Image: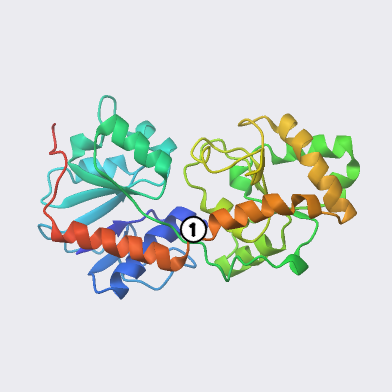
Amino acid sequence: MIFYFCPDMEIRSGGIHRLYRHVRILVEHGFEASILHSRQGFRAPGMPGVPVTSWEAGPALNPGDVIVIPEAAANLMEALRDKPLRRIVCALSWSYIFPHLRGGQDWRDHGIERVLTVSPFVRDAVAWSMGLPVELLDFAVDPQLFAYRPEEKQPRIVYFKRKAKRVHALRRVLGARDPRMAKQIEWVGIDGLDHADYAAEVRKASVFLTLSTEEALNLSVWEAMSAGAVIAGYHGIGMRDVLQGEGPEQNAILADGGDYISLARRMEPMLQDLLAGRMTRWHPLIRNARELAAPHTPQSEEQSVVECWRRLMASPATGSMPGR
């Protein structure tokens, strides 16, 4: 049995969506798999219909079962370290890994066998720092939900409030330069929407702000790329090799992390064109971004997840033993 532990979170999260999608894919391909929440009866909102159990319900954990643990759940790793289970980490963010570990420890101390990730940056960081084997899986951008429909585009900037602490300062800077950029362009926080409504907002948006300074693989950015929104913001470290702010391969408008003054200056020409209804010179940037996102389909994600788990279930556990 494969259990994917998932935090009991009500907010829309690309990471939680990915955990549920993995379980859905595994079940559809004949694997015994389930989401494992803490509270009995809890199911993350808007997620696919998959088997769900909970710690409160007392899941039947048998020797040889596999539990997949998110990178921030170091306490759970420690609690399960002596159980006869196979322990695998699903690492979606580099920034949560070491702050949640007790001093001097890493995942090898908790008997973690290997790591799953969709981020090359996380893969390289874990392999370099801990020496654990890392499986790089593909991820999915739904080409229908996030289709590029130019006729739907509006003078609208969208962003996640919880990841955009300085968005109001950025808007004030642009409004000081030209009040129309703050008032005639709509600025919309898209937190809390279900997946279909969120996708509709992204399709209508002309600009997607990514203002987090600590990202690994930001799925929302890839979805916005697919939908033809201009990406503006920071690479968040983990997207440094993906987002290009200049040259023939430019696919975003970028500034250094946290530098919203420079970001405002670099966004202004595009926003002036947006106000004037003449976005033609930004079409190459949009095209580059859409071409980058296009290969990451539900089919490619499904294939990578299934092939990975077939290998893992056909082979004995490897990696560090507790107390290395």
Q: Amino acid at mark 1?
A: Glu
**Number of marks in the image?**
1
Q: Picture coordinates of residue 303 (x, y %)?
A: 35, 65
Residue located at (35% from left, 41% from top): 123
Q: Quadrant of residue 248?
A: top right
Of the 4 image quadrants, the one containing the N terminus is bottom left
Question: What residue sits 90% from the left and 42% below the top?
Answer: 179
Q: Is residue 182 visible?
A: no
Q: Residue at x 9, y 57 (%)?
A: 63
The furthest residue to the front: 248
Between 284 and 207, the residue placed more toward the observer is 284
Image quadrant in which the C terminus is located: top left
Q: Which residue is mark 1?
A: 10
- Tell me residue 246's x, y (percent): 67, 38
Please tell me which residue lies in front, 79 or 39. Answer: 79
Measured from the top left, where is residue 84 in percent x and y?
Answer: 10, 51
Res. 51 visible in picture: yes
- Going by the image, does 36 lie left or right of 13? left
Q: Tell me if 240 is positioned left or right of 262 in this view.
A: left
Q: Is residue 260 left or right of residue 11?
A: right
Residue 218 x/y as whole percent? 52, 48
Instruction: Give the crowd class for mark 1: few <14, some 14-19, many >=20 residues within 10 Å.
Output: few
Return the residue found at the far top: 104
Q: In percent of the image, x 17 and y 60: which residue is there? A: 313
Q: Quadrant of residue 156?
A: bottom right
Give the image quarter of residue 266. top right
Q: Report helix, strand or loop for mark 1.
A: loop
Considering depth in this image, is 175 or 138 the residue closer to the camera? Answer: 138
Give the side of residue 7 with respect to residue 228, left or right: left
The color scheme shown is rainbow
